[in-house]
Amino acid sequence: MTDTIRLSKRMTELGLCSRREADEFIEMGLVKVDGVVVNVLGSRVRPEQTIELTRQAMALQAERVTFLLNKPVGYGSGPSEAGERPAWQLIKPETRSPRDRSGYTFLKKHLNYLAPAGKLDVDSSGLLVLTQDGRIARALMAKAADFEQEFLVWVEGEVSEAMLEQLRHGLSLDGEALKPVKVSRQSDSQLRFVLRDPVRRQIRRMAELVGLRVTAVKRIRIGRIALGDLEQGQWRYLAEHERF
C-alpha cells in the first residue's frame, strides 16, 4: 500500500476541491476513479489513476461563492478568540457594497461553510477573502507563495534609505532569513510592502527590527484582486470572471 494515497488527499493535490469537499463528494458518490464511482471514505488510489468529479459535483462547486471584505481593525479573520468579533459577521445585506456588479443575489446559504482563505491580523485592516469554494481556499493557503500580497503600512520614525534596504533584504525572523520583500516609500509616514506568504505579523516585526513603529497596516491586494473602492466594513462577491 506504500504506492497508494488517500483519494481525498489526491483530489486536493490535483486542485479538484478542498479536503472537506473531497470527503463530501466521495460520500455522495460524485467522484470517479478510472471511470468508476468511488463512494467509500478512506479509499486509496495510485498516483497514475485518473480522478474526476461528476457533473453534479461541478454544479455544486459552481454554486459556491466567495466574498471580498474590507475588514476593519478589531475583527478576527478566523474563528473568534476571546474579545474578538469574527469578520464573517459583517457579511449581511446592509453592508454589501453598492458597487457590487457581480450579479449575485444574496442568499442565507452563502454563509454556510464559509471560511477565511488566509489570515489578516485583528489589528490590521483591508482585503480579506471568505469563501465556500475549497479550490480558492486551497490555492490561497496551500499555495500562498504563488500570490503577491500588497500592504500599505503607516509608521512612526524617520525612514532612511538604509532602513528601506534592510527591509528589502537581510532581515531574519525566528532564526530564519526572510525572502526579499518589495518595499517603497509612499510618503514620510507611509510605506508600501509587497511580499508572498508572509509569516505571522511579519511586517510589524520587520519594522521593529529597523527601529520603526507601525501604527496601521492595510492589505490592498492579493494576487490580481485589489481592494479597489470597497469601503471599510463593506463586502462584495468575487465575480465569475475574476481570478486571483
Image (cartoon, rainbow, N blue to C red):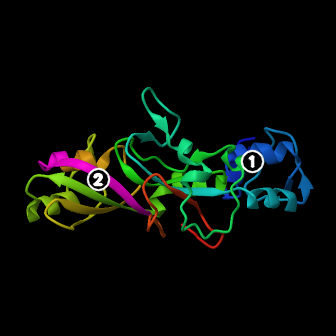
Residue found farthest to the bottom? 241
Q: Which of the 4 image quarters holds residue 170?
A: bottom left
**Which residue is rendered at x = 75% and y = 61% of the image?**
62
Residue 215 magenta-highlighted = yes
Where does the image place residue 201, in percent across and percent down from the top left? Answer: 32, 44
Residue 11 magenta-highlighted = no
Where does the image place residue 218, in percent across and percent down from the top left? Answer: 34, 55
**Which residue is rendered at x = 58% and y = 48% of the image?**
91
How many callouts does the rendering have?
2
Name the N-terminal-most of marks 2 and 1: 1
Q: Are marks 2 and 1 in contact (CB under 8 Å)?
A: no
Residue type, mark 1 in image? Ala
**Which residue is rendered at x = 69% and y = 63% of the image?**
104
Where does the image place residue 46, in percent across and percent down from the top left? Answer: 76, 52
Residue type, mark 2 in image? Leu
Under circle 2, the secondary element is: loop
Can residue 6 be seen?
Answer: no
Label 1: how many Cα within 10 Å (few below 14, some 14–19, many 20+): many
Under circle 1, the secondary element is: helix
Q: Is residue 39 shown above or below 194?
A: above
Q: Mark 2 = which residue?
A: 178
Which of 17 and 47 lies nearest the eye of the viewer? 17
Q: Mark 1 = which residue?
A: 22
**Which residue is rendered at x = 92% and y = 55% of the image?**
36
User: Bounds of the magenta span?
Assistant: 208-221
Q: Which of the 4 image quarters holds residue 20?
A: top right
In the picture provided, is 13 more to the left or to the right than 186? right
Residue found farthest to the front? 94
Residue found farthest to the top? 82
